[in-house]
């Protein structure tokens, strides 16, 4: 058997790994036999030279086999999940998950934490006092069957390899790689025991895949991997060239999700919900998706599902309140059109609100975030307030505002507007 160093050297000259070699790489790191520095070198070699389709299937398989697989054979409805490749203000899972459950589907959802500049669904949920996102598997299964949905993170039981590698990828800037993204996403999803998966592949200046064609290729690659494991995967490519909805951050996104489920959602969120909802419900054999979605929003059942799930995870609904200590307006220095061209920096400004060191240790200020009053392409006058940032620690606020201000321009000519949905 080759040593870890030999395998890194081989990847650096673009040699493919065998199944046994990939198992060794993933297992030895997960078990602590290989240290971070060596694994980081291997991850860098993958970012440079990639893995072919068979290697990616084997890598996904190793991630799955690092933990257990959940089974939902005895459910009387379609077992489905939705996953996004990540963005800023992307709270669609928190809204669509309960909608699908209210329509009769079962939604076991294993999610990630923040990665790079993108927000993590688990961090948002953990901003709710008491929310436990690391349940034992039988409790997870019980909540899915009882409430219709449960959202947890990778655990010691499910995809422990992804949990560890995901953290290291974040710290070593080895995120943007097709096979690593595929193994991470599909590993978690295949382990959940679902029948169908809807992927929201984000594109634009706030996504890992800026280019639409690259995003489509990733969607196809993820679907092909899913098929190899008997999973029905459909993907959509949607925009992440500006934050989705009005709020981006932690608890503020949970509140915006709840408001959307109460019928007060912003148009961009609703458009994505209807689009992904149609794909998901048709996979479940349910037609007239828009009417069904409106019905479960209007009769309050989707909202009730989200509240029940939060309570089942120990979350205290009475503490879901927007009460940041510090709020600062974001003003523009001149008149013109807003040009949101660096949404990644907007995401980084949210992380700055919690302080860099804290973010590395997965500690987020639950009250941190920003609200935007204007979208890309809006006309603004000098000194107009286009949004506000908020948090609990004043010393982080000024830095975060500066990062945010560098994330957009005000231009004289109206910029091209971004398309929200690509396929
Ligand atoms: N989401 C994940 O779960 N993993 C990735 O690698 C990227 C986005």
Image: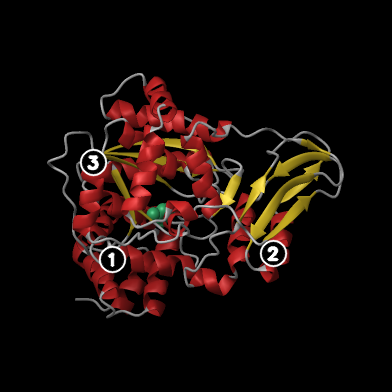
The disc at residue 231 is 3
Q: Picture coordinates of residue 18 (x, y %)?
A: 22, 63
Vertical side of 313 occupied by 340: above or below: above
Vertical side of 173 occupied by 226: above or below: above
Residue indicated by mark 2? 397
Q: Picture coordinates of residue 209 (x, y %)?
A: 50, 48
Does the residue at mark 3 contact the one at mark 2 (Cβ under 8 Å)?
no
Q: Hey, which quadrant is residue 67 in on the image?
A: bottom left
Q: Nearer the viewer, mark 1 or mark 3?
A: 1
| Residue 66 makes an appearance in the image | yes
- Rounded to the nearest angstrom, the CA distance separating label 1 from label 3 is 21 Å
Mark 1 Cβ and ligand 1 under 8 Å apart: no
Q: Residue at 37% x, 23% y: name it.
A: 292
Q: Nearer the viewer, mark 3 or mark 2?
A: 2
In this rendering, position of residue 162 left or right of residue 317: left
Q: Residues within 10 Å of mark 2 (few under 14, many from 20)?
A: many
Location of the N terminus (image quadrant): bottom left
In this rendering, position of residue 31 left or right of residue 302: left
Q: Residues within 10 Å of mark 1 (few under 14, many from 20)?
A: many
Pointer 1 or 3: first along the chain: 1
Q: Residue at 43% x, 40% y: name it.
A: 95
- Rounded to the nearest angstrom, the CA distance separating label 3 from label 2 is 44 Å
Q: Hey, which quadrant is residue 37 in on the image?
A: bottom left
Does the residue at mark 1 contact the one at mark 2 (Cβ under 8 Å)?
no
Q: Hey, which quadrant is residue 405 in on the image?
A: bottom right
- Rounded to the nearest angstrom, the CA distance separating label 1 from label 2 is 35 Å
| Residue 52 makes an appearance in the image | no
Q: Residues within 10 Å of mark 3 (few under 14, many from 20)?
A: some
The disc at residue 160 is 1
Depth check: give the residue in front, 153 or 232: 153
Vertical side of 211 occupied by 38: above or below: below
Q: Nearer the viewer, mark 1 or mark 2?
A: 2
């Amino acid at each position: 058997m080759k040593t870890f160093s030999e395998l890194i050297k081989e990847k650096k000259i673009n040699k493919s790994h065998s199944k046994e070699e990939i198992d060794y790489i993933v297992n030895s790191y997960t078990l602590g036999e290989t240290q971070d520095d060596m694994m980081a070198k291997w991850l860098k070699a993958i970012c440079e030279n990639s893995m072919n389709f068979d290697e990616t299937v084997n890598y996904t398989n190793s991630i799955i086999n690092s933990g257990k697989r959940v089974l939902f054979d005895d459910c009387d409805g379609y077992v489905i999940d939705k996953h996004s490749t990540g963005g800023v203000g992307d709270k669609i899972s928190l809204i669509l998950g309960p909608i699908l459950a209210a329509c009769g589907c079962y939604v076991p959802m294993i999610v990630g934490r923040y990665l790079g500049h993108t927000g993590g669904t688990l961090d948002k949920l953990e901003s709710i006092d008491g929310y436990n996102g690391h349940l034992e598997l039988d409790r997870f299964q019980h909540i899915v069957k009882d409430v219709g949905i449960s959202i947890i993170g990778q655990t010691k039981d499910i995809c422990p390899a992804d949990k560890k590698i995901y953290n290291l990828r974040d710290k070593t800037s080895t995120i943007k790689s097709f096979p690593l993204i595929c193994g991470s996403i599909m590993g978690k999803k295949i382990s959940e025991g679902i029948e169908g998966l809807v992927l929201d592949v984000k594109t634009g200046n706030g996504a890992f895949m800026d280019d639409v064609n690259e995003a489509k290729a990733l969607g196809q690659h993820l679907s092909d991997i899913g098929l190899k494991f008997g999973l029905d995967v459909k993907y959509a490519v949607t925009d992440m060239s500006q934050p989705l909805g009005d709020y981006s951050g932690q608890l503020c996104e949970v509140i915006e999700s709840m408001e959307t489920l109460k019928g007060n959602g912003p148009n961009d969120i609703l458009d994505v919900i209807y689009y992904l909802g149609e794909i998901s419900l048709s996979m479940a054999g349910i037609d007239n998706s828009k009417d069904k979605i409106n019905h479960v929003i209007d009769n309050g059942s989707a909202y009730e599902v989200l509240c029940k799930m939060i309570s089942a995870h120990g979350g205290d609904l009475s503490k879901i309140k927007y009460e940041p200590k510090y709020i600062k307006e974001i003003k523009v220095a001149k008149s013109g059109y807003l040009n949101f061209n660096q949404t990644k920096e907007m995401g980084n400004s949210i992380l700055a609100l919690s302080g860099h060191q804290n973010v590395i240790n997965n500690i987020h200020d639950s009250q941190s975030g920003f609200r935007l009053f204007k979208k890309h392409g809006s006309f603004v006058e000098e000194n107009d307030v286009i949004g506000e940032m908020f948090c609990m620690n004043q010393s982080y606020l000024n830095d975060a505002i500066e990062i945010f201000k560098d994330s957009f321009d005000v231009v004289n000519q109206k910029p091209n507007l971004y398309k929200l949905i690509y396929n």
